[in-house]
Amino acid sequence: MAIAAESKKQVVEQFAIKKGDNGSPEVQVALLTQTILHLTDHLRVHKKDYTSRRGLLMMVGRRSKLLKYLRLSHPERYVKLIARLGLRR
């Protein structure tokens, strides 16, 4: 499930490292987190939507890989990001 363009723009502005940044790991993780939360709510209602469940699991895996990269290369940015997003590690 796609997120609204205005919502996506707000997330990019909030987590961007510098102006015009939309590809940094922080922005990517924040966008994936927003999509994961939206899809989780969808799956609570539609329990048999197995295709969306597979997409959700793929997104969680992608987010996990990005967080691992951030944790190994920039630990201080990693700690700040998971605190802002409320993720546990």
Image (cartoon, rainbow, N blue to C red):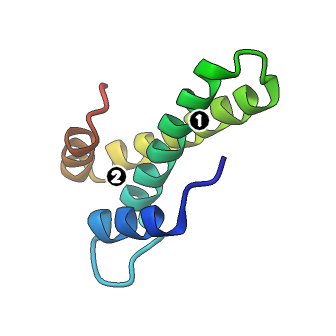
Q: Residue at x 41, y 42 (%)?
A: 67
Under tag 2, what secondary structure?
helix
The vertical placement of 5 against 50, above or below, is below
Query: Given this view, does label 2 or label 1 mark the residue nearer the observer?
Result: 1
**Quadrant of the drawing holding the C terminus:** top left
User: Mark 2 or mark 1: which comes first in sequence?
Assistant: 1
Q: Which residue is mark 1?
A: 39
Kindly report the distance in space between the C-alpha atoms of the residues bearing marks 2 and 1.
29 Å
Amino acid type of the residue that numbered disc 1 sits on in the rendered structure:
Leu
Write the residue at 28% across / 79% down: 18
The residue wearing badge 2 is 73
- For mark 2, does the 10 Å Cα neighbourhood hold few (<14), some (14 to 19), or many (20 or more) residues? few
Residues 57 and 66: in front is 57
Left/right placement of residue 52 relative to residue 57 reads right
Residue 44 falls left or right of residue 73: right
Q: Which kind of residue does numbered mark 2 sit on?
A: Ser
- For residue 13, what is the image quadrant? bottom left
User: Which residue occupies the extreme top position in the image?
Assistant: 47
Name the foreground residue: 60 vs 79.
60
Count of numbered marks: 2
Determine the residue positioned at 54% across, 61% down: 4
